[in-house]
Image (cartoon, helix red, strand yellow):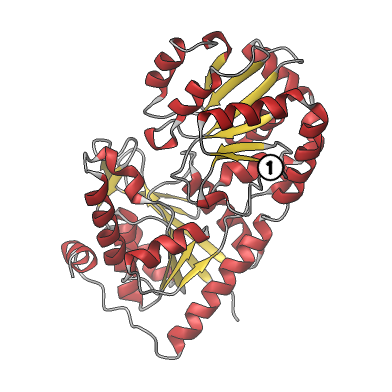
């Protein structure tokens, strides 16, 4: 097959740090390694349309009242015309809102297929809209069906999401392709680096202390208040580091300030991408209480760094965190405390679990991720050639909205 031109559309891109951005950046790198020509269409941070190399920015406006940090855009303008003249072979959409409308418009005009990665379990985010759980699930199911019926193939990162979409009644072909990571960035051998002590010193943590690390977006759906409450049940020789930023940061700091052992809870803020391996290497255990994960990228990073994981029991981590092998999954605060005490108190167990964790992490390489996604593209293009669903001609912005979310 000739060199493919792939357009990736996403509402989120660098310098934002989240699971979607990590997945998109990794995918772009791997597709280019495999010989594809890749361009990105995303939303501008400053409201201005423009281009920087292979990245195109749609003019956008702040939409933080809907979701913290979100932006909205109108899919029109010079960027779309330039991308149409580039003649992409396939669009890989990563989000369901503004950039998806742009993807549909370009696909319609160019007559090319859309592959879509479904990253977000929306029913776990209904607290942002004051919607009750039953209504939230129905709304999420309806919204997902409306969007995904406009695609040719759907990629999901875990079996959990595949089963969710089946329950929603989604009728598109769905493939499970776990998001890969650059495992070489996190090799456990780096744990002896000076970075470990540098980071600990910056937090006032001594070398003999057992450090529990939670890293990611500080948002309500991450259930970080549970970690803070559970930490109060642990021994004084432990420290909890909650690294990252987000809308819940100040509330969580206030909550931690009222907690037993508050002087041992640390909030270092946002961690630069290039620094994340050093923060994993500075820790002894990785902990997570979230049940809203779809990709589990931080789990994979922690495992690749040789960290045993203690996390909430969830379908997302099935086959990744293997209880009693490379970590533990818990169902109650008492279980969390017991598992953390066990690993914190037994250095040999920690070492064995860490070695197994690193072995697990190597199974989720970025290279294999890119290869599997490219194989999905090739299947989609072959199906299109055999007379699959045709994209209709490009329409106006408001027609795109109507036909995507209403019809």
Q: How far from the left and from the top, in percent, is residue 350? A: 76, 32
Residue at 51%, 11% in the rendered image: 260
Front residue of 393 and 140? 140
Where does the C terminus fall, quadrant-wise?
A: bottom left
Question: Is 25 located above or below residue 386 in the figure?
Answer: above
> Residue 72 location in percent, x, y?
27, 47
The reply to whether residue 271 is in sight is no
Give x and y (percent) for residue 396.
19, 66
Is 54 on the left or on the right of 340, as rendered? left
In the picture, residue 172 is in which quadrant?
bottom left
Q: Is residue 20 left or right of residue 351?
A: left
Which residue is depicted at the point 49% across and 39% down? 17
Q: Nearer the viewer, residue 100 or 162?
A: 162
Q: Number of callouts in the render? A: 1
Front-most of residues 52 and 175? 175
Given the current orientation, which residue lies at the most extreme bottom position? 386
Q: Residue at x 79, y 33 (%)?
A: 349
The residue nearer to you, when weighing 258 against 358, is 258
**x and y percentages locating residue 130 in the rendered image:** 21, 39
Q: Secondary structure at mark 1?
A: helix
Q: Residue at x 24, y 55 (%)?
A: 139
**Mark 1 Cα within 10 Å, few/some/many (few <14, many 20+)?**
many
295 displayed left or right of 218: right
Q: State the image quarter where residue 203 is shown.
A: top right
Give left or right: position of 115 versus 377: left
Answer above or below: position of 238 versus 276: above
Camera sees residue 404 = yes
Quarter of the image with the N terminus is bottom right
Q: Which residue is mark 1?
A: 303
């Amino acid at each position: 097959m000739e060199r493919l031109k792939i357009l990736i559309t996403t509402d989120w891109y660098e310098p934002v740090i989240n699971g979607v951005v990590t997945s998109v950046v990794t995918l772009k790198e791997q597709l280019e390694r495999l010989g594809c020509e890749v361009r990105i269409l995303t939303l501008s941070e400053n409201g201005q349309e423009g281009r920087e190399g292979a990245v195109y920015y749609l003019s956008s406006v702040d939409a933080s009242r809907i979701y913290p940090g979100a932006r909205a855009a109108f899919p029109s303008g010079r960027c779309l015309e330039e991308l149409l003249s580039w003649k992409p072979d396939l669009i890989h959409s990563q989000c369901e809102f503004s950039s998806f409308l742009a993807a549909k418009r370009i696909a319609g005009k160019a007559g090319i297929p859309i592959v879509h990665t479904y990253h977000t379990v929306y029913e776990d985010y209904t607290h942002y809209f004051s919607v009750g759980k039953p209504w939230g699930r129905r709304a999420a199911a309806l919204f997902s069906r409306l969007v995904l019926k406009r695609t040719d193939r759907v990629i999901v990162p875990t079996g959990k999401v595949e089963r969710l979409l089946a329950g929603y009644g989604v009728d598109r072909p769905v493939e499970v392709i776990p998001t890969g990571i650059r495992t070489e960035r996190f090799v456990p051998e780096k744990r002896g680096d000076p970075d470990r002590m540098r980071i600990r010193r910056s937090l006032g943590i001594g070398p003999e202390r057992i450090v529990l690390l939670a890293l990611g977006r500080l948002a309500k759906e991450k259930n970080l208040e549970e970690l803070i409450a559970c930490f109060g049940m642990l021994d004084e020789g432990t420290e909890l580091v909650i690294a990252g930023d987000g809308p819940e940061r100040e509330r969580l700091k206030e909550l931690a300030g009222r907690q037993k052992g508050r002087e041992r809870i640390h909030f270092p803020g946002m961690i630069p991408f290039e620094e994340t391996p050093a923060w994993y290497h500075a820790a002894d255990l990785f902990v997570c209480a979230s049940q809203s994960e779809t990709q589990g990228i931080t789990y994979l990073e922690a495992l690749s760094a040789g960290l045993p994981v203690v996390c909430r029991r969830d379908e997302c981590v099935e086959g990744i965190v293997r209880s009693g092998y490379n970590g533990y999954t818990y169902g109650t605060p008492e279980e969390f405390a017991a598992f953390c005490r066990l690993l914190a108190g037994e250095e040999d167990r920690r070492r064995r679990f860490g070695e197994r964790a690193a072995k697990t992490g190597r199974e989720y390489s970025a290279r294999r991720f890119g290869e599997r996604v490219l194989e999905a593209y090739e299947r989609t293009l072959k199906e299109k050639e055999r007379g699959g669903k045709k994209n209709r001609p490009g329409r106006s912005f408001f027609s795109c909205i109507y036909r995507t979310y209403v019809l």
